[in-house]
Image (cartoon, rainbow, N blue to C red):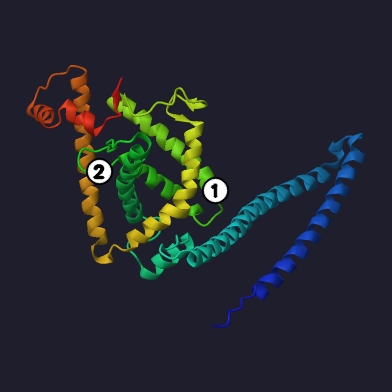
């Protein structure tokens, strides 16, 4: 059995910290004594009029400025050191979890930690490493497809039948899932190595905003809705509600801690030689698919309102995408 490596805290760091801590404690004591003495003097002179002790006022105001500056500096230091401490504890905890899952599992590969993903991406110099455009596009693309598959399976399990959940006319894609995956990844990426509380809060906020904006956009542009939470408690205009916002928070944890690392592994399997070219090809396809889908749905809304086709494009859409086809593609879409 190989001898375990031993690490120690940097001795220089420990010595410097001890000295700084001693200096700060002494400074705190000196400041307290000096300020208390001057405040007592101010109280003493107040009855006779403080205008005669202008220098004392100036000295105290100078100290106020110094203390305000120190407070801001210590606040920044507190935020930085707390974040670093939380990240250290989180990385150790997740490394232990990975080790335990590696020992317990026999047939399934354990879920990698985000720290492992970061290290692998930098080591490979992968074209989609980090929180870049290429990484985010692939997360968006996989999310568009994966969301449809998961929701169709969920519908099959809960309702006993398959129901179409696509959002575009070409291919099993839904932009809502894609943008949700993209937004969660983009905003939660900086907290990927932090405790789950940050992931929950981020998912709660980001998911709720996305859901609200998607509902608002669909109603304004197409005059339709795909969900309505008006009967749910603590809802906002029927577009979001507390229960589903909590689900978004839970999804935030699951996403950045479990789903994102898996997706990052899949993305790393795309060769660097073709990765960027393939990304741009798929991006062009998704843009065309989205524009065509918007045009087809808009024409459907016109037909629902009795608007007759007036040109060749509208007649072509009516022929290729009649109401029956559209109802099958988008079974939950309702026009107001």
Quarter of the figure that contains the C terminus? top left
SS assignment at label 1? helix
SS assignment at label 2? loop
The answer to whether residue 33 is left or right of residue 119 is right
Depth order, front residue of 107/271: 107
Location of mark 1 (residue): 198
Q: Is residue 128 visible?
A: no
Which image quadrant is residue 9 in?
bottom right
Image position, residue 152 (x, y; %): 32, 40
Q: Is residue 83 visible?
A: yes
Q: Residues within 10 Å of mark 1 (few under 14, many from 20)?
A: some
| Residue 182 numbered tag | none
Q: Are marks 1 and 2 in contact (CB under 8 Å)?
A: no
> How many numbered marks are there?
2
The answer to whether residue 296 is left or right of residue 6 is left
Q: Is residue 239 above or below residue 91?
A: above
Q: Is residue 225 above or below residue 146?
A: above
The answer to whether residue 143 is left or right of residue 90 is left
Q: Is residue 39 above or below residue 6?
A: above
Depth order, front residue of 53/189: 189
| Residue 172 numbered tag | 2
Q: What's the residue at 92%, 34% (across, down)?
A: 47
Image position, residue 267 (x, y; %): 33, 59
Looking at the image, the residue that sits furthest to the top is 306
Looking at the image, the residue that sits furthest to the front is 160
Image position, residue 298 (x, y; %): 22, 27
Q: Is residue 44 above or below residue 255?
A: above
**In whole angstroms, how far apart are the C-alphas of marks 1 and 2?**
32 Å
Which image quadrant is residue 134 in?
bottom left
């Amino acid at each position: 059995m190989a001898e375990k490596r031993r690490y120690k805290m940097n001795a220089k760091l420990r010595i410097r910290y001890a000295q700084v801590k001693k200096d700060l404690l002494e400074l705190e004591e000196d400041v307290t004594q000096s300020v208390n003495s001057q405040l007592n003097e101010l109280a003493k002179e107040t009855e006779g009029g403080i205008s005669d002790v202008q220098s004392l006022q100036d000295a105290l105001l100078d100290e106020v400025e110094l203390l305000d500056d120190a407070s801001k500096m210590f606040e920044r230091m507190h935020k930085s050191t707390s974040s670093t401490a939380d990240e250290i504890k989180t990385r150790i905890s997740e490394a232990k979890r990975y080790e335990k899952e590696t020992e317990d599992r026999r047939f399934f590969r354990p879920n990698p930690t985000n720290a492992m993903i970061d290290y692998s991406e930098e080591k490979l110099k992968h074209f989609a490493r980090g929180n870049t455009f290429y990484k985010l596009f692939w997360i968006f693309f996989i999310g568009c497809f994966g969301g449809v598959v998961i929701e169709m399976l969920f519908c099959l399990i809960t309702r006993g039948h398959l129901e179409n959940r696509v959002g575009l006319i070409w291919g099993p894609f839904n932009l809502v899932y894609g943008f949700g995956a993209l937004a969660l990844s983009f905003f939660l990426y900086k907290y990927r190595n932090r405790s789950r509380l940050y992931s929950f809060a981020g998912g709660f906020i980001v998911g709720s905003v996305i859901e609200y904006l998607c509902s608002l956009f669909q109603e304004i542009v197409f005059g339709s809705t795909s969900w309505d939470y008006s009967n749910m408690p603590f809802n906002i205009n029927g577009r979001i509600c507390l229960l589903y916002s909590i689900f978004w928070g839970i999804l935030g944890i699951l996403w950045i801690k479990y789903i994102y690392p898996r997706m990052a592994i899949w993305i790393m399997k795309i060769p660097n030689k073709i990765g960027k070219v393939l990304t741009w090809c798929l991006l062009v396809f998704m843009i065309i698919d989205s524009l065509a889908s918007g045009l087809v749905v808009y024409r459907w809304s016109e037909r629902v309102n009795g608007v007759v086709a007036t040109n060749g494009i509208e007649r072509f859409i009516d022929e290729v995408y009649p109401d029956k086809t559209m109802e099958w593609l988008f079974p939950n879409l309702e026009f107001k």
